[in-house]
């Protein structure tokens, strides 16, 4: 019988279920909460409400889609914070606004709960293979305690700074990811409008070093018109929105990323649950009269 602490997941979607599978392979026991009471492959035990899960867990991992879901699952009489014991460790892997992270840290401090904000860089392929990059904000001691968990789900942990730093670093990374995809999509749009052969164009871009490996993966999907979600457009647009909001608060001018956010907003409107690379389909449709 495993002596490793039970790890509870608040949220058990595409990313969390893959992280959970890697933790099980590393010898941990897991249980989860989702509003629907289900998720993953059917082999995971589900506990409701979050308070009950938190009362069982030695470590609690939050992995929910947005700020609103985090607030709903953490706070209130049935929220996870009501069930966590003093001294417990809460790891928030959700991508949320820096001010949401700061508010959660204040609530945790009032209950003597240790918090690490630890969003991850990578999509479902990296989550499945255990090759995520953990962007951790918090104390060195807390991160040291959580390191075996991070080692089970990722290939690298970056200590970004105090609590809130993980959220800010994740917005930097996703802003670059979304902004550069928009630039690649614009290049494709010009090439198609100018009459270049579609297959040749996509094949050529797959060979040149100026395109990142991540975006080459997106180019392959766009060439095949297969936008199966690895990172849904609704989540990428949400992250760009969070970045734009905090950038305005910091008076940081981000004109290129702001423009990219507009294209990703249109992509979310048309393809909310498909991969954010469906931006290619939106742009191609403008010049090639395709759906």
Image (cartoon, rainbow, N blue to C red):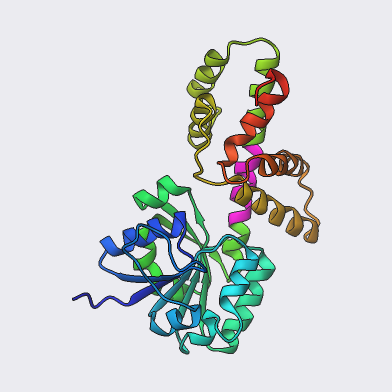
Q: Nearer the viewer, residue 102 or 2?
A: 2
Image location (x, y in percent) of residue 118? 51, 64
Q: Residue at x 68, y 50 (%)?
A: 240
Above or below, comparing residue 272 to residue 160 in the picture: above
Q: Which image quarter: residue 170?
A: bottom right
Magenta-colored stretch includes residue 175: yes
Q: From which residue to which does the magenta span run?
A: 170-180
Image location (x, y in percent) of residue 211? 54, 29
Q: Residue furthest left?
A: 1
Q: Nearer the viewer, residue 119 or 29?
A: 29
Q: Nearer the viewer, residue 195 or 208?
A: 195
Above or below, comparing residue 199 to residue 51 in the picture: above
Q: Residue at x 49, y 23 (%)?
A: 206
Magenta-colored stretch includes residue 243: no
Image location (x, y in percent) of residue 54? 45, 81
Above or below, comparing residue 176 to residue 82 in the picture: above
Residue 106 visible in this rendered orientation of the protein: yes
Q: Nearer the viewer, residue 260 or 238?
A: 238
User: Total of numbered circles in the picture?
Assistant: 0
What is the quadrant of the N terminus in the image?
A: bottom left
Image location (x, y in percent) of residue 164? 61, 68
Q: Residue at x 66, y 53 (%)?
A: 238
């Amino acid at each position: 019988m495993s002596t490793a602490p039970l790890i509870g997941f608040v949220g058990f979607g595409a990313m969390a279920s893959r992280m959970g599978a890697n933790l099980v392979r590393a010898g941990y026991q897991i249980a989860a909460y989702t509003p629907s009471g289900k998720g993953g492959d059917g082999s995971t035990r589900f506990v409701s409400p979050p308070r009950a899960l938190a009362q069982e867990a030695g470590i609690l991992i939050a992995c929910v889609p947005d700020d609103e879901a985090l607030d709903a699952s953490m706070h209130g009489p049935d929220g996870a914070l009501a069930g966590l014991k003093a001294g417990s460790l809460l790891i928030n892997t959700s991508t949320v606004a820096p001010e949401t992270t700061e508010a959660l840290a204040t609530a945790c401090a009032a209950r003597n709960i240790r918090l690490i904000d630890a969003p991850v860089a990578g999509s479902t392929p990296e989550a499945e293979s255990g090759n995520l990059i953990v962007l951790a904000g918090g104390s060195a001691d807390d991160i040291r305690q959580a390191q075996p968990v991070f080692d089970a789900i990722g290939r690298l942990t970056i200590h970004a700074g105090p609590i809130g730093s993980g959220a800010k670093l994740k917005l930097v990374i996703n802003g670059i990811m979304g902004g550069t995809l928009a630039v690649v999509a614009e290049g494709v749009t010009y090439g198609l409008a100018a009459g270049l052969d579609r297959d040749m164009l996509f094949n050529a871009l797959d060979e040149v070093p100026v395109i990142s490996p991540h975006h080459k993966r997106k180019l392959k999907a766009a060439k095949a018109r297969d936008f199966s979600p690895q990172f849904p457009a609704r989540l990428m647009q949400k992250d760009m929105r969070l970045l734009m909001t905090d950038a305005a608060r910091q008076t940081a001018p981000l004109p290129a990323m702001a423009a990219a956010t507009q294209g990703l907003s249109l992509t979310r409107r048309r393809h909310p649950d498909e991969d954010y690379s469906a931006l290619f389909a939106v742009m191609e449709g403008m010049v090639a009269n395709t759906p």
